[in-house]
Amino acid sequence: MLTPNSDKFRFYKRGVIRNQRHVSICLKKTKYTHKVDEKYLSFSIDISVLAGGYWWEGSQGTQRGLGTEKTTPLDLQQRKLNKLVNALGPAYLRVGGSEADNLHYFTPPPEQPNALVLTHEIWNNLHHFCQKNQLDLMFTFKYGLFRKSLHGSWQTDQVQKLLKYSNANQQKIAICELGNELNAYWAFHGLNSQPVASKLAKDYDTFIRVVRDLSPESKVAGPGSAFWPRLGETIKPISNITPKFLAAIEEKLDIVDWHYYPFQSRRSPLKTRSATLKNLLSVRSFLDYEKYLSQLIRYRDRFQPDAEIWTGETGSAQCGGEANLSDRFVSSFWWADQLGRGARLGQKVMIRQSLIGGDYALINKNTLKPNPDYWVSWLWNKLMGDSVFQVTSNDNQVLTYCHSAKKMGKCTLLIINMTPFPKRIHNQGFGIKKKRFEITANNLLDAEVRINGVKPKFNGGKIKLKDFPTLSKLDLVSPYSINFWCFSL
């Protein structure tokens, strides 16, 4: 059996990588190449979790892109949840997901008494939660047109209803988007429900005009297309609608966004790269993200040159994540890399699916314990500033990214050691190393991590960088580790 600590695993890794113990990392320029949003690392709560729809906990398969088990609405007033979220702010909070297109605002229709409803109480509590935790709301409004005959003539009554209520109650929606993964309607709702790009563009133009009229301070994002590893927008010509949509839309978008998962869980009916231990440790698995993001940037530059690029939804594995992998330390490597890679390519915001709920969550929904990716996110938000610098490594298994520092010094270097060997780092152009923070675990499949050798924990509801012991200023990084090195002039 291939396990992270077995001799067979070590020999396997030796066959894949060069056993190079010395790594040269060079800061190419002292001037930043571009800037990310100050809320670059953001996250989502799926509408199914928030309002009590069909979700992944306990589900063994899928039904039209959803879990098979119904959950209870999330209690946003839990003290521990708020403590954990507050430590990650400020951020954008996206509320969307597959059931956004089945959702009814405030009251169910008479013919569907058991329909999923966004009640006044849930909506009000959501805004209170955002205000309390320095979160700006991104909301996915209902498109919900499941018949081709309706496409191109979308009605605005539901959106107007929610926006007018929000205006009356001084509730801000920072980002508005229409529909969830509109290029994947064929998968969720059947082939006959898939909108063509030209008619979808007409509906989106209508949506944008309503938002500009009733909520002029809100930005508009779209189309939120789903991309699959190895396939991109999957089935041509049914689902590759993004370039045609961006060419056809008349109104300006503030944000061109997309959805991407590098792996698929066992629940997923379509698997192009399964979530396995081997795949999660393969640098090649990370490269499709760059391929498709670069493609989307070209579309943006051609059709919506003033818009920002956001990853509007991402997690380790589609359909809720993979149990005992997505919630373990081994999953933290793709997350640290994708944060760095997306920023390096000029993307403004990365929204993680999910904050809570599913095996891919930052916070375990049942125990309210932080999963390993939570601590990668926490250190990123504490240490990585918004200016992105160009940096290189001569070892393709040691991934490196560099940003301005948030509080301490000149810059912060992220070093991801994807090998079972310690690495000696030789820095060029960085200045004086001041602080080091290293995330490790006893085992790649551990649910708990250590920062500088200590398990992170909250004391009196707070956690600070100074709570962790100071590492010696050696030039070593541990095997399978995620490192943040802080430099001063």
Image (cartoon, rainbow, N blue to C red):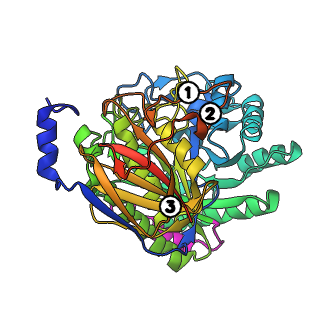
Toward the right, the furthest residue is: 168
What is the C-alpha distance between the residues marked 1 and 2? Answer: 7 Å
The residue lying toward the viewer, choosing from 473 and 312, is 473
Q: Mark 3 points at which residue?
A: 432
Q: Position of residue 167 (x, y in %)?
A: 85, 48
| Amino acid on which the number 3 mark rests in the picture | Ile
The mark found on residue 463 in the picture is 2
Q: Nearer the viewer, mark 1 or mark 3?
A: 3
Name the residue tied to disc 1: 457
Residue at 55%, 38% (x, y): give it.
99
- Up the image or down, 68 lies above or below 408; here it is above
Query: Magenta segment: does it hold 227?
Result: no
Camera-side residue of 63 and 377:
377
Does residue 214 appear to the left or right of 380 in the view shown? right
Q: Do the residues labelled 1 and 2 touch (CB within 8 Å)?
A: yes
Secondary structure character of the magenta stretch overall: loop
